Amino acid sequence: MERFKTIEGKIVPLDRVNIDTDQIIPKQFLKRIERTGFGQFLFNDWRFNNDDSLNEEFILNKEMYKSASVLVTGDNFGSGSSREHAAWALHDYGFRCILAPSFADIFFNNCFQNGLLPIVLPKEKIRNIIDESINNNGLELTIDLESQTIFNISLEINIQFDIDPYRKYCMLNGLDNIALTLQHIDKIDLYENQNI
Amino acid sequence: MINNNPKTLLDKLWETHIVHEEKLQPSILYVDLHLIHEVTTPQAFEGLRLSGRQVRRPDLTLATADHNTPTWDRSKPITDPISMQQLKTLSENCEEFGITLYDMYSPLQGIVHVIGPEQGYTQPGMVIVCGDSHTSTHGAFGSLAFGIGTSEVEHVLATQTLRQFKPKSMEIRVNGTLQFGVTAKDVILAIIGKIGVSGATGYAVEYTGKVIRSLSMESRMTICNMSIEAGGRAGMVAPDEITFEYMQGKAKVPKGDDFEKAIEKWKLLRTDIGAKYDHVVNISGDDIEPYVTWGTNPGMVIPVTDTIPDPESFSDPQEKDSASRALKYMDLKAGTPINEIFIDRVFIGSCTNSRIEDLESAASVVEGHKVNKNVSAMVVPGSYAVKKEAENRGLDKIFKDAGFDWREAGCSMCLGMNPDVLSPGERCASTSNRNFEGRQGKGGRTHLVSPQMAAAAAIAGHFVDIRKW
């Protein structure tokens, strides 16, 4: 897995709650058998009109947000279907970090498997970030995983965030979960001998 | 005797599956049954091949093809080459790694969450996972069952374990008695309406109370199935005589003395008196009415007697915004009585409501009537076995005589990965689990209801209160 240390990037505020994985990557794109190439289909039904033309109104299509790598959004992001294609699509499109007041459980886990860092922040902090972005006509943030901080020095933004230490360790080192578990193969053998 | 260490059902299931634990790390949990389907596994098998790993326990892994499978005549070729490729990939992977597969031509094929219980793979006390969020269905048997992503599927294939942090426990107690015409679907919609679409995030839910105890296994499955729509990865019901009676004689369930011994063990799978849940929700079963969703998530739901809510009535600005966005997408006006909403399509099916009891109850409403001339309606049984049983009971004839399409088994229009989709603007009464934007087809408008409510809507052409049918 890709390591995650520090990223600097533009944010895009997608100010909605309960964005489900059917919106992030609609089902017609789940038929592919590859793990890559899903970015072009990210938020397909919102990014494109029914005649496949670009929906200029949708925030991701606005020129100033085109190279954004930090998605800032509302409660319960990634709800619904377990499709990991949602995390793949966000990552492939260029996102490396998502800030939200809460995430759905399966999506949250899937992000960590793909070098995509989901950060839970209190609602007021999310609101402040969105307001700063609007007031300054865009906002760049640095997200440093080691120190668990989100900052922008010139705007005097400095936010600490929480993350589970095990997940942090795996992200920082780009560790393969399967290899880690296989270090305990004797325990799995033992469990099977005793129980299965 | 006083139990000094009372445990919840979740505690018991969790503790008996720990392979390894370390402080501040997720536990390594053993997986007793790994269900797989064509959509969320190709990349996992590819990962195994790239790292030279094997499937550790193909004997504890079961595959079926359900999401892409056409519900038309299966002797005809699949028209979508990408769907075809995905189904072919599943077959090849199962062949290569020695996994049992019920493909679309097998008499044991069906929706993954229908065939597990139907054939007795699903048993109390198990940890069951699948790359599918509706895996919570299997919790109805007193197992810990939850959906996982594709990376986790690969982890289970390679190690037969999963790294998990223990969820918190929530009891949802449904007491009282359900009114005539109120079903398990209405119970779970009422629960989601009350606690919200993220009300159970971070929790494994255990459903308890008199209403739950009185429900059949198929109804309990409907409730557990939609736990994820409230954010809960797992939903559970402690097993009881109803569970054991349902299981008896199923192909993979132990027989004779072994079955009796298993029952003695399974009876211990209940929350001990005095055990504490992290959170408790009480619901009065007497107050539950038939429900219809009006918006674009399952929490946007009202009783059939109600009117479409006014976005201005929500105090939270984001909820207000969501509601007005939903009304725009659904093309509905605040204040409209829900039973005045006319529909174009009816879908009876999905892992929520496609079992034999669902089809029986829908058929009982349909019998002697005709589908409204403005409505196109279909029934998609959850499995080939459900289809055959329905045909033995003559249900297919009732549906067909009324003008319903009678289809082959699969996920079908619950998510429209096969050719069964809504056209933009079409409005559908659906027994499935998600009314998300575009879920049943881009621009399609979904209203979630029980099988009886869907059947009545098909006949009337609009929603009706099934209690007055």
Image (spheres, grey):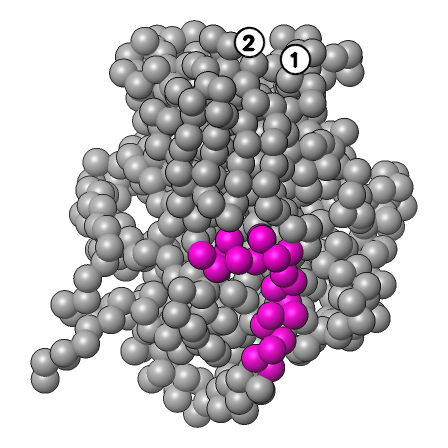
The percent coordinates of residue B78 (x first, y second) are: 86, 44
Q: Residue under mark 1: which chain is it in?
A: A
> Mark 2 — on which chain does it sit?
A
Q: Nearer the viewer, residue B14 or B338?
A: B14
- Disc 2: which residue: A137
Is B259 contained in the magenta span? no
The x and y percentages for residue A157 are: 43, 25
- Is B325 drawn above or below residue A36 in the view shown? above
Residue at point 75%, 54% (across, down): B43
Is the C-beta separation of discs 2 and 1 under 8 Å? yes
Q: Residue at x 58, y 53 (%)?
A: A172
* Image quadrant assignment for residue B60: bottom right
Q: Nearer the viewer, residue B156 or B120?
A: B156
* Residue for point 63% across, 61% down: A175
Residue B391 at what x, y percent from top left? 63, 53
The crowding category of the residue bearing disc 1, from other C-alpha atoms within 10 Å (few below 14, some 14 to 19, many at least 20), is: some
Q: In which quadrant of the rendered image does the C terminus of chain B lie? A: top left
Question: Viewer-proximal residue, B234 or B80?
Answer: B234
> What secondary structure characterizes most of the magenta part?
helix
Q: Amino acid at mark 1?
A: Met
* Amino acid carrying mark 2 in the image: Asn
In which quarter of the view is residue B294 placed?
A: top left
Report the residue marked by disc 1. Answer: A64
Disc with the residue nearer the chain's start (2 vs 1): 1
Q: CA–CA distance between discs 2 and 1?
A: 9 Å
x then y, percent, for residue A160: 40, 38
Which of the 4 image quarters holds residue B204? bottom left
Q: Is residue A27 left or right of residue A160?
A: right
Q: Which residues are drawn in magenta?
A: A165-185
Q: Residue at x 61, y 36 (%)?
A: A7
